[in-house]
Amino acid sequence: MNIVPLAVAPMMDWTDRHCRYFHRLLAPSAVLYTEMVTAAALVHGDAGRLLAFNTEEHPVVLQVGGSEPELMRTAAKLAEQAGYDAVNINIGCPSDRVQKGAFGACLMAEPDTVSQCWQAMAEAVSIPVTVKSRIGIDDRDDAAFLDAFVDAVAGAGCTHFDIHARIAILAGLSPKQNREVPPLIYDAVYRQKQRRPDLTVFINGGIVDADAAAAHLQHVDGVMIGRAAYQDPWSLVAFEQLANPDYTPPARAAVVHEMADYVERALGQGASLKHVTRHMLGLFNGLPGARAWRRTLSERAHLDGVGPELLLAALEPLESVAA
Ligand SMILES: Cc1cc2nc3c(=O)[nH]c(=O)nc-3n(C[C@H](O)[C@H](O)[C@H](O)COP(=O)(O)O)c2cc1C
């Protein structure tokens, strides 16, 4: 199978369907991940709403959180029926352990549970079932811990691991601090690929430019980009060029026009303008006029009666740099 070496990370509140549509315009081949959805929410809640996406988003991966094999199996089936290209299990989120419905990084200490979930899901669907984890949790930051986790889950049959190259600290740090405080240890991720060349390993954490991504690709199969892609969306163009050297990026103005057309359709389906434009605030980062762009969108997108023309109005003073 031909692996695209670029993915945009799952990010709650950020990588919703509007965001993914926008990212797709900048990075045509990147694999786009959804926000995490819990298996319980999918099974007991409004799955149709939680799973809806635009066909342009392919390849798109649904990320699911949970630890109960039967719920995870049903969630995987729903993902496949909805047309997702793969389903990914969240073993990286530093949520507190709760009695039922545990998910996230705490499950690194329960590789058997993860294996059971993986098996239940993989039996039920023909799309790939993958795992996103950290390199350890709390005081388990040693090589043996991560090796044992990967080997156990790979033993169940999982062949694709996205690994955020820092441990998660389960008590005492907020999720945000857990993305900043524990140090990045890229070697721990590289080692998994060295040990297990049979597995597909994507590295995640702190990758902010294409040079860094290229260096990682010497050691692993792919890079997964989180905050850099969201906060500086144009950085996706350079990541895409790395993954796909023939890529000719669009002009920023063309992206804005496509997003205006998208807004028109999305408003017709009940979305609100600000839910789309909030993902686009960073599009002109680093260029003259970036602040005015950001201000126009933030101050006016929520006003009654405002539609796609806001994007075109905000673009006007930027036409010379956006071409
Ligand atoms: C706002 C936000 C929400 C996140 N939500 C999720 C999530 O739902 N599932 C997940 O596995 N990771 C989540 N993450 C972690 C990212 O996927 C990624 O692992 C992390 O940000 C490190 O990558 P980066 O340094 O490239 O941002 C989130 C990160 C951010 C900033």
Image (cartoon, rainbow, N blue to C red):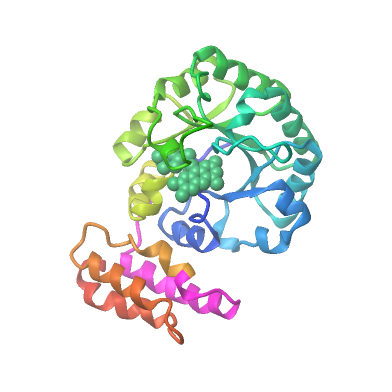
From the viewer's side, name the closer residue of 288 and 174.
174
From the viewer's side, name the closer residue of 148 and 23.
148
Location of residue 187 with respect to 129 vertically, above or below = above
Identity of the residue furthest to the front in this view: 172
Q: Is residue 113 left or right of residue 8?
A: right
Query: Residue drawn 40% across and 53% down?
Result: 230
Q: Position of residue 289 (x, y in %)?
A: 21, 68
Q: Position of residue 323 (x, y in %)?
A: 26, 68
Location of residue 83 with respect to 314 vertically, above or below = above
Query: Residue drawn 37% across and 80% down?
Result: 310
From the viewer's side, name the closer residue of 75 and 160.
75
Q: For residue 134: magenta?
A: no
Location of residue 185 with respect to 270 vertically, above or below = above
Q: Is residue 247 left or right of residue 99?
A: left
Q: Position of residue 35 (x, y in %)?
A: 56, 51
Identity of the residue furthest to the bottom in this view: 305
From the viewer's side, name the closer residue of 7 and 178.
178
Query: Residue drawn 72% across and 33% down?
Result: 118
Query: Residue drawn 47% across and 57% down?
Result: 24
In this orientation, does residue 74 appear? yes
Q: Which residues are magenta?
A: 247-274
The image quarter in which residue 319 lies: bottom left
Q: For residue 258: magenta?
A: yes
Q: Mainly helix, strand or loop, the magenta region?
A: helix
